[in-house]
Image (tube, rainbow, N blue to C red):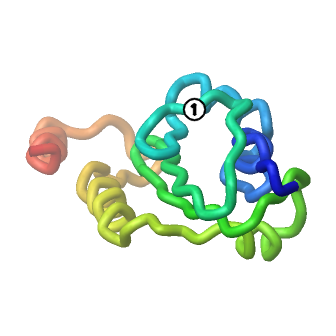
């Protein structure tokens, strides 16, 4: 394995994507970057590479610490990656989720005019 591993296999093996076909599709869409360049699914990665994964609304950053081709346990996946995503990225997404949604109980019907205005104030 000194030559490297395909990026789509590695993304699937370390459990970033649920299936290899999803990993391949995301590579083709240009959402996987190595050295700030979009990569094809057949691109080989090596230990020490920095991989940026765009999973809207998050942008995740990983460093490759091991090359695995087959999906194993979650602990094995964690041993082969280092998550370099800054905490601010998670905080930004959490803040957007908390401020963007107005929670209503199920079955309460449509919001009244006043409730709708209050919801619209939250979006500002």
Residue at 28% across / 54% down in the picture? Answer: 96
Q: Is residue 112 left or right of residue 71?
A: left
The quarter holding residue 20 reads top right
The quarter holding residue 56 reads top left
Q: Locate residue 103, reporting x and y percent.
A: 35, 54
Most extreme residue toward the front, as rendered? 2
Q: Locate residue 3, reporting x and y percent.
A: 80, 49
Front position in the image: 103 or 122: 122
The quarter holding residue 22 reads top right
Residue at 16% across / 44% down in the picture? Answer: 123
Q: Is residue 34 left or right of residue 14?
A: left
Q: Is residue 61 left or right of residue 113?
A: right
Q: Which residue is mark 1?
A: 39
Front position in the image: 106 or 95: 95
Q: Locate residue 2, reporting x and y percent.
A: 83, 56
Front position in the image: 9 or 91: 9
Q: Is residue 97 left or right of residue 13?
A: left
């Amino acid at each position: 394995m000194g030559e490297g591993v395909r990026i789509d296999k590695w993304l699937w093996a370390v459990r970033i994507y649920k299936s290899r076909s999803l990993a391949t599709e995301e590579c083709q869409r240009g959402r996987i970057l190595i050295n700030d360049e979009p990569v094809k699914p057949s691109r080989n990665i090596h230990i020490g590479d920095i991989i940026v994964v765009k999973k809207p609304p998050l942008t995740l950053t990983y460093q490759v610490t091991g090359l695995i081709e087959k999906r194993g346990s979650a602990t094995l996946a964690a041993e082969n990656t280092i998550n370099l995503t800054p905490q601010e990225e998670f905080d930004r997404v959490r803040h957007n989720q908390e401020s963007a949604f107005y929670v209503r109980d199920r079955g309460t019907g449509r919001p009244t005019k006043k409730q709708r205005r209050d919801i619209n104030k939250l979006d500002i």
